[in-house]
Amino acid sequence: MFSLENTATPATSTLDELVPSRYALKVGDIEVLVVSDGVLPLPTQMLGHNVQSSERAAWLDKMYLPQDAFDWALNAMVVHSGDRTILVDAGLGMDPDLHLPRAGQLIHRLGAAGIDLAEVTDVVITHMHMDHVGGLLVDGVKERLRPDLRIHIAASEVEFWKSPDFTHTNMPQGFPDALRATAKHFWAEYSDRVHTFEDEREVAPGVIIRRTGGHTPGHSVVRLASGGEALTFAGDAVFAVGFEQPNWYNGFEHDPEEAARVRIALLKDLARTGEMLVATHLPFPSVGRVAADGDTFRWVPVFWDF
């Protein structure tokens, strides 16, 4: 069992870890640790391949970001509720021959936070893209996991990856093949531990996974609720540009029109409730709230608590 008290300092201190890589908070009685898996540099076209390059350039300039490549954060969560310790997504894992040396740090950083993989009772997979399942494929990880580990994935997600459709995506060369191969490898290794659900499942007290679709057919979000507080882990439903430009298509979305509808509905709901948001590809630690701003939205990061 992990606690907020024992995650304040790393087990070891090394000069290659000079940036924060985990952030602890509580949602009522539920303990949460957001852990960075690193960053994924991608062409800026991935932020909105349905708009003119001049529009993307203007947004990047306004955000003081480079025009050629954008560093996507990769965030996962560890959640403790009741007697369950839940890993929400598993990071990229080993570099799938795509030359991504700044990603795939999750397993190392879980260890630095004092989290024993043998303590994890459940893994929730928001969707089966390689940067969400790859950490489970790192050499030696499977042997450290409990034999009764439960992996929760939407049934429609499993079905999709039997014959995935990439016709509406817009990815750099090599990514579709790597995504197919990683999903196939993951299924071969862990299908006997996968527990599918149709629309919604309570994984632990106050921890509910809900299928949204859009990004992939079985893409899901995880909502934590306890003591009048709530937080939603949105997976890939929300990207950094998605607040001001929620209708921009992301290159990894298999159904970009539906993904935009899902994104707008989720952001409207979070703006209405004031609940916290964490997402895979928002800048670490990605904990914040959403404010409505006319027909668009505004990201309101929380003040860090030490």
Image: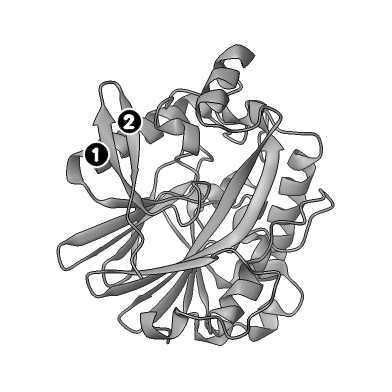
Please report the residue visible at 56 percent of the width from the left and 86 percent of the height from the top.
118
Foreground residue among 25 and 131: 25
Counting from the top left corner in percent of width and height, residue 10 is at 55, 81
Q: Is residue 70 above or below residue 33?
A: above
Tell me the number on the disc at residue 297.
Answer: 2
Q: Is residue 1 above or below residue 229?
A: below
Query: Would you say the residues marked 2 and 1 are in contact, meaning their CB atoms lie under 8 Å apart?
Result: yes
Secondary structure at numbered mark 2: strand
| Pointer 2 or 1: first along the chain | 1
Nearest to the observer: residue 220 or residue 108? 108
Residue that mark 1 sits on: 271
Q: Label 1 is placed on what type of residue?
A: Ala
Locate residue 114, reporting x and y percent. 53, 84
Quarter of the picture holding the C terminus = bottom left
Q: Identify the disc placed on residue 290.
A: none
Q: Position of residue 105 (x, y in %)?
A: 66, 65
Graded by Cα atoms within 10 Å as few (under 14), some (14 to 19) or many (20 or more), the crowding at tag 2 reads some
